[in-house]
Image: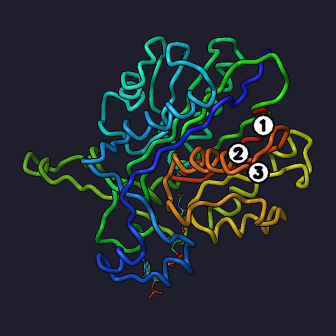
Amino acid sequence: MPFAHIVGTGSAIPQRILSNADLERIVDTSDEWITRRTGIKERHVAMADNHESTADLGSRAARRAMEMAGITADLIDMIIVATVSPDRIFPSAGCMIQREIEANNAVAFDLSAGCSGFVYALEMANNSIKMGQSRNVLIIGAERLSSVTNWQDRSTCVLLGDGAGAVLLSSQEMAGGILSTHIKSDGRLWDLLYADKGNPPLPASLEGITTIPFHLKMEGNRLFKQAVPSMANIAEHALAQNGLRLEDIQLVIPHQANLRILQAVSERLTIPMEKFYTNLQKYGNTSAASIPLAMDEAFREGRIKRGNHVLLVSFGAGLTWGAAVLQWTI
Ligand code: UT7
C-alpha cells in the first residue's frame, strides 16, 4: 500500500488586523480579559476590497502549497475543503477553488466537521491515497468566521478570526508521511456550538420565513470542559496506536481555540508547552483553518524538520475531535 506524504504547505491571511484594542471599541471587553482568558491578541478579518472570500483565501493557500511541492494544478486528483463558513450554501467552496486554481482534473467537495474539519479531511485524503484512488490530494481549511460572528456578543466575537491553510499530499512508496488518523464525534452535544446562517428554524407560519437568525452561539465554559479530556485522550490513543512515547513527538500542532485549553492538554499529556506550536495570539480561532495554518507557519519557521514526528489534535463543533500522527518527510 502506498503512503500519503505531505509535500507542500501554504496559508493565506486577510490583510485587515482587528486588535483587542479595536474590539474594546465594539463590545464591553478589555485586552486584559481577552489575553488572560484566551491568549489572543489580534485576529484578521476578510474584506471585500481585498478579495478575501473563503474561496479566495483557500485558493491562495492552495497555490502556495502547490508551489512548495512543485506540483501543477492539472496533477491534483482531489480537493477537500474543510470549512464551516463557505461563501455559498452551494456550490461548494471546493468547486469554487477548483475553478480558481484550474485544477480541472480533480474532484472537489466540502467537508463540515467544525474545527476538526482538517483532521477529518486528512483521514479522507489518506484513505483515498492508500486505496490507490488518488495520487495528489489538496486539503484546505478555509474560514471566514467573521461572516457568522455576532459582533454584539462579547463572549464569542473576541475569539474568532479568518484565514486559510492548505496541505498537498502525494502518494509515495516510501514509508512515512501520515502514520495514522483518528476521528470522533458526539452529536448529543451539537447545541454547545452552532450557527444558524442559511438554515433558519422551521417557520411557524409564512410570515416567519423572513426572520433569519444569523449568528454563532456557544456555551464556552461547557465546551472548554469537553475539549480538554477529548483532546488529551485521542492524542494518547494516537500515540499508543503508533507505539510512540511522548518524548518521540517533536511538535504538537493543536487546534488553536484557547491557550488555557492547550495548557491543560499539555499538562494531561505531560508534553511540555514548548512542544506545542501556537499562533492563536495573532489569528484567534480560525476553526478548520487553524491546524493547516499553524502547520505552514511552523514548517516555514523551521520548527519541523525532516524525520520529525508531529502530532495533530483538534476539537470543535459537532462535537467533533480528532488526532493524527505524521512523520515529516520534506
Ligand atoms: O473551537 C473549538 C470550540 N471552542 C472552544 O473549545 C472554546 C472553549 N471555551 C473557551 O475558550 C472559554 O470558555 C471562553 C474563552 C469562551 C470563555 O472563558 P471562560 O473563562 O470560560 O469565561 P466564562 O464564559 O465563564 O465567563 C467569565 C466571565 C463572565 O462574567 P461573570 O458572569 O463572571 O460576571 C462573562 O460575562 O467573563 C465575562 N466575559 C467577558 N468579559 C470581558 C465573557 N466574555 C467576555 C469578554 N470580555 N470578551
Residue 46 versus residue 65 in the image, above or below: below
Task: Decide which of 281, 94 is in the foreground and name it.
Answer: 281
Separation of residues labelled 2 and 3 (CA atoms): 6 Å
The numbered dot on residue 323 is 2
Mark 2 vs mark 1, foreground winner is 1
Amino acid type at image mark 2: Ala
Q: Which residue shows up at 67% across the image and 22% down it?
A: 170
The secondary element bearing badge 2 is classed as: strand
Q: Which residue shows up at 40% across the image and 28% down it?
A: 97
Amino acid type at image mark 3: Ala
The numbered dot on residue 328 is 1
Query: Left or right of 27: which side holds 14?
Result: right
In the picture, the quarter occupied by the N terminus is top right
Which is more N-terminal, label 3 or label 2?
Answer: 3
The secondary element bearing badge 3 is classed as: helix
Mark 1 vs mark 3, foreground winner is 1
Task: Decide which of 117, 6 is in the foreground and name it.
Answer: 6
Separation of residues labelled 1 and 3 (CA atoms): 18 Å
Label 3 CB-ligand 1 distance < 8 A: no
Q: Residues within 10 Å of mark 3 (few under 14, many from 20)?
A: many
Residues tagged 2 and 3 counted as in contact (Cβ below 8 A) = yes
User: Which residue has dot 3 on it?
Assistant: 235
Residues tagged 2 and 1 counted as in contact (Cβ below 8 A) = no
Amino acid type at image mark 1: Trp
Residue 149 versus residue 186 in the image, above or below: below
Q: x, y percentage for residue 241?
A: 85, 40
In the picture, the quarter occupied by the C terminus is top right
Q: Residues within 10 Å of mark 1 (few under 14, many from 20)?
A: many
Q: x, y percentage for residue 274?
A: 77, 64
Which is more N-terminal, label 3 or label 1?
Answer: 3
**Residue projecting furthest to the left:** 207
